[in-house]
Amino acid sequence: MITLTLTALLTLLHCMQAPPAETKPKPTTPVTPAAPQRVGSTTVVPPPFVPTSGAQPVGGNDKLGTMPPPYIEGAHQFLVQPGQTWQHIIEDVKPGDEIIFPAGFHVSQVIEGLQGTREKPIFLRSRDRIPAAVACDGDGWVFHRPKHVVVENIMFLNPRGAAVVIDGRDGETVPAQPWPAEFTLRSCTVDSARADAAQDAVRLRSVTNVRIDQVQVEGWNDAAVEIVDSRRVLVRALMMVPKKNMPQSVGIKVLGNSGLISVTGCAFNKTIRVGVQVGTPCPDGDVKFAPAIDQMRIDRCIFDGIGTGVSIVNVRDLVLSRATLINPTDAIYSIPPDAGTVSKVLVERCLAFWVPGALAQFSPHPDRIPTPSVTLGENLWYSLELPTAWEVLGAPFGFQSGGQMTDLDPGIDTTTFRPRNGEALRYGAHSIAASQGKRLPDDPVDSDPPPVAPQRQP
C-alpha cells in the first residue's frame, strides 16, 4: 500500500508563496498583453486580466508594525485596525491605493463596488508577514460587483457560508452577462472546522475574469471553490487539505452557465469525495434542466487518495490532461446517472496508479452516453491487478485514439509524485511536485507545457 504525504506539496506551496527579496515600490507600467505561445497543437494565451502592477506579492514587512512600501508609487495606504469595519473607507480609495490589515483578528465585511483600473488595481493585503486573520461569521469578505481588485496574504477562519464571495449579481438577479470583476485572490489561506453542510471556501457568482492563485484551503464541507454562472476563471496551484470529521464533498465545483474555466497545478488530497465536478446535474438526463459548461481544461493536477478524480456531469468541450491519480477509491473519472450533455471530452497523458482492490470502478457511466463522447489519448493506467481486472472494473470508457498503457510500473516516488521509471515521465503531473513546475533535464521536451489560461471571449 503506497502511503502518500502532503509534505512535498505543502513545501512547494510555501516556496511558491515566498516573497521576493526586492520590496521597493513598483512604478506603474502600461499593460502590454503577452503574445500567445504555441505548445503542440494548443495555443496558450496568457490571461489578460492578471495585473502587472504588484504582480509579485511581498507579504508584508519583516519588521512587525512597519507599513510595507506600496506597490504603485504615490499610492495611498489605508490602515484598518483589528476589529474595525472599513466600509466607510471605500469612498476614499482610489485606483492603485491599498487597504492594509495588521496581524490580528479582523471582521467580516460586505464590500460594495470597490473598483480600481487595469493599470492600477486596488490591493487588500496584510501589513506583516504574519497574515491578518478574518474571523468569519456567516461569510467572510463578500465583494459585490468589484473591478480590478487584488486580495493577498489574508487568512480566513471558520466561515459558515464562504470565506470569500465574489458576486456579480444585482441582488439575487442573475445578469444576462457575467460582471467583469477582474479580480485576483492569491497567497491566502482558508481554515475551517465548522460543520455547516453548504460551506465553501471561495464562491463565485456571475462574474468573469477571476484568478484564484496559490490559495490553501484547510477544511470545508461542500466545495473548496464553487464557480456558478461565471466565465474566464483561472484556478492555479490550489492546495486542498482535508480535515477529519468534515465531508469535503468536492474540491472544485463548476455549475450553471459557466465556461472558459482553467484548473491547473492543483493538489486534491485524501478524503475528498470528488476532485472536480464539471456541470450541474440534470434529473433523468433532461438537458433542458441546466446548461452545459462551455470549454474547461484541467491540467497538471495531482489527486491523492480521493474518491473520484473528475465527475463529468454536464459539459461541452472538456480536456483532462496530465493528471496524476494515486489510489482513487471510487473511479478515475465518472459520468453520473443524472448527467446532462457530455460532448467533446478528451483524456490525455494522464497517469493513475492504485493497489489491487483499492479502486471500485474505472469509469462508470450511464448506458445512454455514447462512447465517442469521450476520447482517450495516450494514458498510463497501472495496477498489479491489470489487465485481468478490466472484467471487474470495466475498461476505460471512451473512444481510444491513442494507446492505453497498462504494463509499465511508473514507480511513483511517494514524496515528489515523480515516476522513478523514466519511461513514465511522459504522463501525469509529476514535475509540479518534483521541480515546482520547471522542466527537469531528463523530462521529455513536451512533458510540462505552460498552463492554459481561459481564452478571450469572441
Image: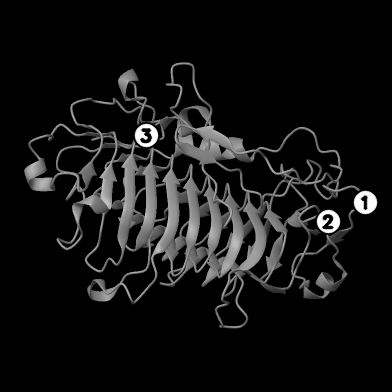
In the rendered structure, the answer to whether residue 130 lies left or right of residue 367 reads: right
Q: Position of residue 22 (x, y in %)?
A: 80, 34
Q: Position of residue 428 (x, y in %)?
A: 37, 34
Q: Position of residue 304 (x, y in %)?
A: 35, 43
Instruction: From the image, tell me which residue sits under label 3.
Output: 428
**Quadrant of residue 424 within the rendered picture:** top left
Q: How many marks?
A: 3
Q: CA distance from mark 2 to mark 1?
A: 9 Å
Identify the residue shown where x is 43% and y is 72%.
Answer: 198
Q: Position of residue 341 (x, y in %)?
A: 31, 64
Q: Nearer the viewer, residue 253 or 344?
A: 344
Q: Nearer the viewer, residue 325 or 115?
A: 115
Give the residue type that dot 3 points to. Answer: Gly
Q: CA distance from mark 1 to mark 3?
A: 46 Å
The first of marks 2 and 3 along the sequence is 2
The reply to whether dot 2 and dot 3 touch (C-beta < 8 Å) is no
Checking the image for residue 74, the label placed there is 1
Q: CA distance from mark 2 to mark 3?
A: 40 Å
Instruction: Name the outermost residue toward the front.
Output: 458
Identify the residue shown where x is 44% and y is 16%.
Answer: 442
Give the residue type that dot 1 points to. Answer: Gly
Give the residue type that dot 2 points to. Answer: Gly
Instruction: From the image, tell me which residue sits under label 2.
Output: 96
